[in-house]
Image (spheres, grey):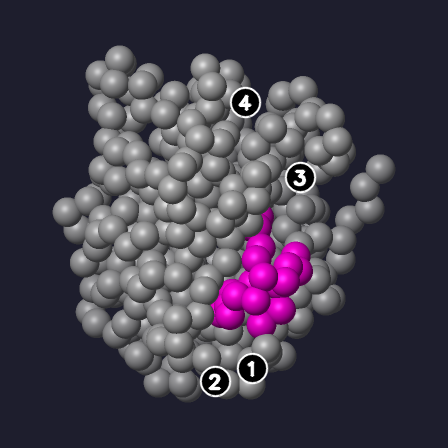
Amino acid sequence: MAPIQNKIDFAQPINIAPIFDNDCTAHQAVCVEIGRVLEADGVFIAAGLPDGTQFERRANSLLAFFDLPAAAKLRLATTRMRADSPRSYRGYVSSLKDGWAYNEYFDIGPERATPAPAITAAKIFAEANCWPAHPPFAEWRAEMLRYHQAMEKTGAAILRAAADFLGLAESDISTRFRNAGSTVRLLNYPRRPDGTTISDEMPEADGTRLITGRHVDAAALSLLWQREAGLQAQTPDGRWLDIPLCAGTVSVHLGTVMEFLSGGRWPATPHRVIDSGAARGSIGYFHEPNLDADLSPLLPVVENSGQKNPGLTYGAHLLERFGRYEGLEHLVTPVRG
């Protein structure tokens, strides 16, 4: 079956509701649609979320975190901002300066304990959550956890659909994601001052003014919600697609984990955020495998894809990525054969 070719400049919508139902015919049809669009574009807009009636209200309310006093946010800061912080991963980070993104963010994982990985240095990725002593409103923490649970359910269902399309065994996926510590990230983009410079992680020179440079995510899938427009994703053939605002939806992007597991058949989706000159809010959910999950290819490696990851674990992959970031240079990257 030939892949769908997107003839317009917007990511394609898919109603994913059938992947949560027992209608086998509808379920299989949506699995095929998800697989075809991810193969062609690396991104789609997911409608029909399981928590759809509450989703938009909840997402908007969670961004009230950034209305907290600066001192309250600083108490939750990681070592990237406070050398005396007991946290290196979960918590608050401000990047309101020159760099590859102009934003501030707050991360949580699941409340359940995440098993410590075999690689000692990767234990920071199993950190427990931290919470404001005085949250923005009484139910804020509970709403954060509900959002995480809803996105975890959604990410797992989309991943199963994608794996089905690729012909991967369900056991190959379930064993790698059984003890995962997937991340919810609240993001705030204040109006960017004139004179600040945003550099791309993977440079390009198309003259577009950005507030987040072109990058890919270290996860299997990224499920991204935006309160204001600006997000764009790049297809494998180089086209930039706008991610439109549509209430009750998230955009779904491939991460490096899917690139590894698919042997390069599904490369991670580059994305960026355009600077409109106004403030912006968004929420990212990153569907991640176990820290000790083996990322060796489950499909034949695509020629010239550069996929050479025998024995690479997700924890080791995170160390390689995060050790490049300011304030985390102390992370030790394990030696691979």
Q: Does residue 105 appear in the picture of this structure?
A: no
Q: CA distance from mark 1 to mark 3?
A: 37 Å
Specify the principal SS of the magenta part: loop
The front one of 230 and 292 is 230
- Counting residues from the start of the chain, the first of labels 2 and 3 encountered is 2
Which of the two discs, 1 and 3, sits closer to the camera? 1
User: Marks 1 and 3: CB-CB under 8 Å?
Assistant: no
Instruction: Tell me the distance, in whole angstroms, between the alpha carbons under discs 2 and 4.
Output: 47 Å
Dot 2 alpha-carbon crowd within 10 angstroms: few under 14, some 14 to 19, many 20 or more: few
Name the residue located 26 percent from the left edge and 40 percent from the top edge: 47
Give whichever of discs 1 and 3 has the lower sequence position: 1
Mark 4 highlights which residue?
A: 172
Q: Marks 3 and 4, Cα distance to the nearest angstrom?
A: 14 Å
Residues under numbered marks 1 and 2 in contact, where contact means CB atoms less than 8 Å apart: yes
**Cα separation between marks 1 and 2:** 6 Å
Identify the mark at residue 196; answer none if there is no mark. 1
Q: Is residue 60 above or below residue 255?
A: below
Indicate the quadrant containing the C terminus: top left, top right, bottom left or bottom right. top right
Give the extent of the magenta segment. 198-218
Query: In the rendered structure, which amino acid carries the disc numbered 2?
Result: Pro
Q: Residues within 10 Å of mark 3 (few under 14, many from 20)?
A: many
* Residue on which the image places disc 3: 313
Secondary structure under tag 3 reads loop
Q: Is residue 4 left or right of residue 329?
A: left
| Magenta run includes residue 303 | no
Residue 123, given in percent of the width and then of the height, sits at: 62, 53
Amino acid carrying mark 1 in the image:
Thr
Mark 2, residue position: 193
Q: Along the line of sight, which residue is nearer the eye, 82 or 11?
A: 11
Q: Position of residue 161 (x, y in %)?
A: 40, 25
Which callout, 4 or 1, points to the residue nearer the camera?
1
Residue type for callout 4: Asp
